[in-house]
Image (cartoon, helix red, strand yellow):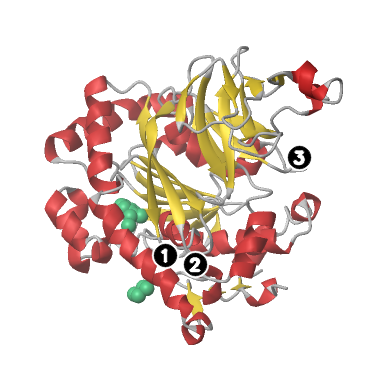
């Protein structure tokens, strides 16, 4: 039995180290977090045509996501209802239906069991085919980004994203929409799934130090941070955390900060030209953030950097391993030359062999694997930077930490993490809607 209260201290901003290692905690996470939260599946741009499909994971469960004949999207657990073999062995493709490799049971795009070899001869009337379709998973999309949820009591995806949409809309909608370039690259890291999530949601602190060599090699505006030569000045950025632990760290006007010289100039021009359009389409307040660098996570395991334009899911593979899926984000209306430049820059920085991806991975693996030692695993993690400095953001209604570097979004992430591990169902979580800010602000 896991004592959740002993894991996360919200008031004090600390977490027990064993959350990165313990198998019982991991099992609880699969049930209470991955079993209830909206988990990223794919984007409209990856499966545009009828019969297009992609295979991915929701927690440890493998799912098949398929574009339907009516233009909708459905998702199914990727196992055969006969003896449980995998139905689709490809990572992605286009199909008219899906046939299990084991005995040849065949399913339609809508998951219905359509045919069984020699059904009449070998089963007679025994088989209730209409109850033996592939098991369907609830899906919803926000601006073309499809997420799945195992819990029918969960709020809609839009409500789950909540006030955090104020920030998502800036890049998902501001210039007419965003899309992902796939197929996603896949890579394995030997770390707990939360180590990259917390890094992306709230860590501008490590950039000048962990990424010193990469920043120097890449050049560009962020290179002044290399080796911690400078602290970003006051007003250089903010940190945001929201109701269900989604968060973002913002470096103002630094979107193109990791792109090469000419690529960076092209991107900077795009952001400058489009800022007035964003103001018109959304609001002046949101346009103020357009062209900033966002480092962000959507609870529980979906992260993105806007500006550096990587979009990732950190799929858990046991308590001390993950499988990373990596796409490139582009705005739909960017000229093709800029889309290509953004993709090249993403591969160089946060692709599977990207310079910054490799820098980060070493930290994430050590944070995880040191906990094989019981004395180290008994320790605590500290995320107290800026504790007490945050307040409610009058523009977006989220909680805001008013500095570029700080750990507000870490604390928000782990507040939500604790809430999910403790609550017996979504009703209990909903009952806390009016109180979560007080927990974080210590009121
Ligand atoms: O590595 C990161 N999470 C990051 C990179 C954050 C801010 C700017 C660039
Ligand atoms: Fe932050 Fe070591 S200095 S983990
Ligand atoms: Fe990093």
Mark 2–mark 1 distance (CA, rounded to whole Å): 9 Å
Is the residue marked by circle 3 packed among few (<14), some (14-19), or many (20+) residues within 10 Å?
few
User: Does residue 290 appear to the left or right of 62 in the view shown?
Assistant: left
User: Does residue 364 appear to the left or right of 94 in the view shown?
Assistant: left
At x 24%, y 60%, the residue is 211
From the image, state whether disc 2 or disc 1 is nearer to you: 1
Mark 1–mark 3 distance (CA, rounded to whole Å): 36 Å
Q: Position of residue 56 (x, y in %)?
A: 52, 38
- Which label is found at residue 406? 1
Which circle's residue, 2 or 3, is located before the other in the chain?
3
Say if mark 1 contacts mark 3, CB within 8 Å: no
The image quadrant of residue 434 is bottom right
The image quadrant of residue 75 is top right
Instruction: From the viewer's side, name the closer residue of 241 and 427.
Output: 427
Give the secondary structure at mark 2.
loop
Q: Residue furthest bottom?
A: 375
Mark 2–mark 3 distance (CA, rounded to whole Å): 37 Å
- Which label is found at residue 389? 2
- Give the quarter of the figure containing the N terminus: bottom right
- Give the quarter of the figure containing the C terminus: bottom right
Give the secondary structure at mark 1.
loop
Can residue 201 be seen from the camera position used here? no
Which circle's residue, 1 or 3, is located before the other in the chain?
3
């Amino acid at each position: 039995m896991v004592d959740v209260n002993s894991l996360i201290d919200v008031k004090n901003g600390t977490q027990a180290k064993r959350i990165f290692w313990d198998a019982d905690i991991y099992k609880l996470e699969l049930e209470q977090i991955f079993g209830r939260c909206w988990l990223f599946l794919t984007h409209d741009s990856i499966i545009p045509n009828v019969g297009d499909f992609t295979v991915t994971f929701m927690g440890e469960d493998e799912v098949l996501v398929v574009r339907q004949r009516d233009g909708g999207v459905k998702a199914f657990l990727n196992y055969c209802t006969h003896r449980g073999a995998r139905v689709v062995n490809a990572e992605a493709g286009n199909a008219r239906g899906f046939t299990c490799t084991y005995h040849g049971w065949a399913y339609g795009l809508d998951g219905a069991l359509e045919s069984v070899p020699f059904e009449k001869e070998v089963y007679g009337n025994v088989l209730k085919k209409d109850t033996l379709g592939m098991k369907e998973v609830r899906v919803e999309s926000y601006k073309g980004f499809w997420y799945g949820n195992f819990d029918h009591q969960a709020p809609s995806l839009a409500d789950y994203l909540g006030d955090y949409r104020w920030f998502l809309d800036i890049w998902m909608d501001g210039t007419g929409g965003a899309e992902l370039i796939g197929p996603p690259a896949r890579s394995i890291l030997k770390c707990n799934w939360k180590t990259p999530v917390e890094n992306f949601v709230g860590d501008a602190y490590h950039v000048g130090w962990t990424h010193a060599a990469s920043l120097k090699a890449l050049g560009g505006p962020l290179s002044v941070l290399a080796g911690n030569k400078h602290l970003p000045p006051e007003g250089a950025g903010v940190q945001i955390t929201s109701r269900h632990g989604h968060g973002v760290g913002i470096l103002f006007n630094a979107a193109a900060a990791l792109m090469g010289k000419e690529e960076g100039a092209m991107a900077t021009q795009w952001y400058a030209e489009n800022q007035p359009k964003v103001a018109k389409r959304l609001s002046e307040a949101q346009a103020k953030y357009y062209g900033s660098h966002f480092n962000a996570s959507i609870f529980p395991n979906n992260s993105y950097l806007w500006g550096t334009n990587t979009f990732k899911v950190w799929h858990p593979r046991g308590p001390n391993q993950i499988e990373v899926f990596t796409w490139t984000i582009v705005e739909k209306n960017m000229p093709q030359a800029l889309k290509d430049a953004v993709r090249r820059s993403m591969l160089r920085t946060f692709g599977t062999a990207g310079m910054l991806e490799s820098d980060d991975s070493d930290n994430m693996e050590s944070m995880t694997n040191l906990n094989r030692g019981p004395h180290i695993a008994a320790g605590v993690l500290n995320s107290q930077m800026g504790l007490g400095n945050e307040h409610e953001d009058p523009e977006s209604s989220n909680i805001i930490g008013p500095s570029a570097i700080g750990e507000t979004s870490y604390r928000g992430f782990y507040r939500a993490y604790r809430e999910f591990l403790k609550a017996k169902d979504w009703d209990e979580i909903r009952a806390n809607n009016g109180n979560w800010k007080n927990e974080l602000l210590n009121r």
